[in-house]
Amino acid sequence: MEPIRVQFRWVFPPNGSPIENAVVTFEKNRLTDLVANRAVRDTPRRLNAALIAGVVNAHTHLEFSDLQQPLVVSSPFTAWIRVLLQHRRTRNVAVAETIATGLQEVTRNGTTLVGEINTTGDQPAYHTSEARCVVFRELIGLSPETISDQLQIARDHLELADDNGRFLPALSPHAPYSVHPTLLEEIVQISGDASAPIAMHLAETLAERDLLENGTGEFRTMLEEFGIFSSELFGGRRPLDELRTLAQAERALVIHGNYLDDDEIEFLTGQLQMSVVYCPRTHAYFGHQHHPWRTLIDRGVRVALGTDSRASNPDLSVWEEAKFLRRQHPDFPPQQLLQMATINGEAALLGEDAILPELEGRTVDDLSVIELPHQESRDPYGLLFHPSSRCRSLSAVLKSVVNDQAQ
């Protein structure tokens, strides 16, 4: 295949200033050259678009991609859980099909890397997806009797990595109200032995803190209804206890972290192997209080973006999450917001060493395109996060360019 040259209105290097009217060359599925305003013999196709590092969805549950809109019940949180479990039991669509549908949506929206929570085991759609999938096998068990079986599930899952690097196995002890502390410790050990990341829902609701600290509240009621509440496990605990255990992992993702307190944020400071994944529109859907994401960033904690699932979000577009934050926090530096949607998620899922500091050398599958509004502006970030901007797959854009040139 001949090299493909495209001129982008703006190019945003991960750790540099935006470059205007950059001519970008792709050879053998890789970005090999990037120069601003370079004169080329064959005039390249000019796109009213921006080229950025790949957009990353650091947390999602694709099994609920059959939902067309978020569940009507959003509070109390345990009522939402009950409705979600009911949907899982009664839906007529196979899980493999909903996961495939979700992967089609995230790739259509320009996502290049997905942190997926999986409850059923391996699914074929992950291995053929355009986006790489870090697949966290969900593990649940409050009673000591469940620990052995859950650990075997974890070991089996970590054996599923494929040769092409599209499927990367990882582990997810679900949450502190559904995972025995001993099980959590063992999962962290297993994940470390395999150099696999680990993700846990933590400090998601005030009700969760009530259960951990006092052994009371709506979670106790729900666990009693399920017949799995144990007074020995709850009361006198905090999310900080789970954070200390998770910190022993090679890489750990704290999912949501909506109600992390000052001590917990202080603990995360300096824990470079740990990241917090913030899902802004899901946070708004549940009506949670102020999320500490800006405090976390100010303290040097890595924050990435996720969509959670269609049970709490209208779509699976991380770019829409970023634009939502831009509208809500126009004073926040847009350079950092772009990093939250891209390289922060890469580092959280793959590790700092896996991140290329420049766009050169990245494959087509590790880059995203943002279609820009047709308006005159000297503000690249204003264009990038404009309400009408749209994220697309670079491979789809390049295919269109090649087809146009062939006609």
Image (cartoon, rainbow, N blue to C red):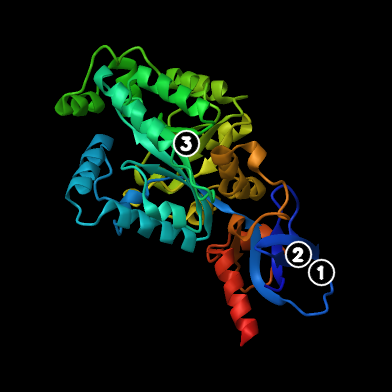
- Tell me the amino acid under the disc marked 2: Glu
What label does residue 257 carry, if any? none
Where in the figure is residue 167, as x and y percent of width and height?
Answer: 48, 47
**Is 282 in front, or is 119?**
119
Outermost residue to the bottom: 407
Characterize the local packing of mark 1: few (<14), some (14-19) or many (20 or more) Cα atoms within 10 angstroms.
Answer: few
Write the residue at 56% across / 49% down: 341
Q: Can residue 206 be seen by looking at this rendering?
A: no
The mark nearer the N terminus, 2 or 3, is: 2
| Residue at mark 1 | 37
When the figure is inspected, residue 296 is found, relative to residue 247, above or below; the finding is: below
Nearer to us of marks 1 and 2 is 1
Quarter of the rendering containing residue 199: top left
Circle 3: element type:
loop
What label does residue 20 carry, if any? 2
- Tell me the amino acid under the disc marked 1: Asn
Where in the figure is residue 390, as x and y percent of width and height?
Answer: 53, 64
**Is 394 in front, or is 77?**
394
**Is 334 in front, or is 244?**
244
| Residue at mark 3 | 291
The quadrant in which the C terminus is found is bottom right
Write the residue at 70% across / 71% down: 6
Q: Are marks 1 and 3 in contact (CB under 8 Å)?
A: no
